[in-house]
Amino acid sequence: MVKKGFTQKRSRRVTLKKTSFLYLSLFVMTMLSLGFLFQGCTLLFVSKGETRYVENKTPQTPPAPSLSRQMNKTVVLKYKVQEGDTFQSIAAIYYGVTSKASKVASANHLSLKSKLKEGKVLRIVDPVNFPNPKELVKKKPTAQTTTETPKPGPISHLDTTPENITQVPRPKKNYAFGPGEKLTFEVKALSMVGGYGTLEIGNPVTVQDRPCYPLSAKATAAFPFSMVYQVHDVQTSYFDVVDFLTWKFENDVLEGKHKAQNLEIYDQVKHKVVRSKGNEPPEEIDIAPFTQDIISCFFYFRLLPLEVGKNYSIPAQAAGYNYNLIVEVIKKERITIPSGTYDCLLVKPHVRYATVFRNTDDINIWLTDDQRHLPVLVTSKIFIGNVEATLIEANLPKVKEPEKKPEPRIQTHKRKKEEE
């Protein structure tokens, strides 16, 4: 069985901006234990490679139609031309390559030879990248920057081309989790218990007229660390029960002297998210179709049919930045932790922002090799040494069993009677 978890504990204020997307990958697939410690879970027993669960009854989910077709319509963004812009530089921003310059021109009924006038608003059709408006002002990529040879890594830039990313249809049924699931993790740093974290799924609620599971990730510091550095984080995503994506994300963070409350409201049909941070003015950002938040992307990943040697890409947004979470399935492995022995899949997260990779080789996640894909163990290296987040308890509701494909019928042909 495979279980997946992220764990990373930090004794300093952690923000997505400061740690950039390295931290995102942890927090994305790992809000599950990430620098924020998780706490809580209830009962999962494993012995001799077999897992025994304490199961709860699953409440009935309100019926609702899928909005997948509306969400999958052509995306059209607007870009205001700035001084020095060319079709090539704009193509580099939104498509990652200058060769798409003709697509930008034709979408606006212009010739590639046309000179762009500052202030003109262009239509960008079905972009690959969704930059934050602030980035377009502060730093604009040029045609030259896209011709540089990408730095080698566990997954290179070339590995993100369609033929190297496993293309799978979006799941239509949930065989992995449900209301009542609660996972508890113990986080250790330098062989000492630093904190606890929980991942919990609540009963369905209605958000923007959609039935959603509240997905909560909570983290607290353990004594004696809590006496020096207090941690109490609560991150909640509202995950569409039918279409398996986020409609709302909110958090309440206390880390040392740092306090924060953030709210994100998603419009998945119009491909927008409105972010509110404390007393700052709300910020509207364009997002890719079927975008996930830092909590929902982990649960969405659990729904996918994971295969060794495959790479899976999930569009996500955090702290106002869009990125692709690339998850690499390394191998199958049986591991033993204090709670028992598990048959697992070892996976690694990689964050791709625009055309640049933030590789996270030091993060390893073990997920149960079954339909639930539960996180069992997460290991990572930080500046003070190794950190581990270990599943210590699990309360698991009963989930639907995948439908078994009927065995092919074998037809036998009777011999014709020989003519007398």
Image (cartoon, rainbow, N blue to C red):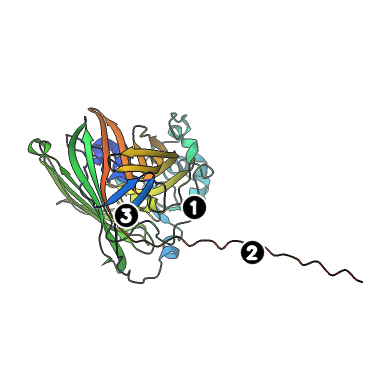
Of callouts 3 and 1, the N-terminal one: 3
- At label 1, counting other C-alpha atoms closer than 10 Å, the crowd grade (few under 14, some 14-19, many 20 or more) is few
Numbered mark located on residue 168 in the image? 1
Question: Does residue 411 appear to the left or right of 39 in the view shown?
Answer: right
Seen from the viewer's position, the closer of residues 368 and 80 is 368
Residue at image x 37%, y 59%?
244
Query: Residue 109 location, x and y as percent?
Result: 51, 54
Q: Which residue is mark 3?
A: 53
Instruction: Name, please, the residue furthest toward the right.
Output: 420
Of callouts 1 and 2, the N-terminal one: 1
Q: Which residue is mark 2?
A: 409
Residue type at mark 3 is Tyr
Seen from the viewer's position, the closer of residues 327 and 198 is 198
Question: Does residue 93 appear to the left or right of 337 in the view shown?
Answer: right
Instruction: Name, please, the residue furthest toward the left.
Output: 227
Residue type at mark 1 is Val
Of callouts 3 and 2, the N-terminal one: 3
- In space, the residues marked 1 and 2 are separated at their CA atoms by 28 Å
- At label 3, counting other C-alpha atoms closer than 10 Å, the crowd grade (few under 14, some 14-19, many 20 or more) is some
Give the structural element (helix, strand or loop) at label 2: loop
Give the structural element (helix, strand or loop) at label 3: strand
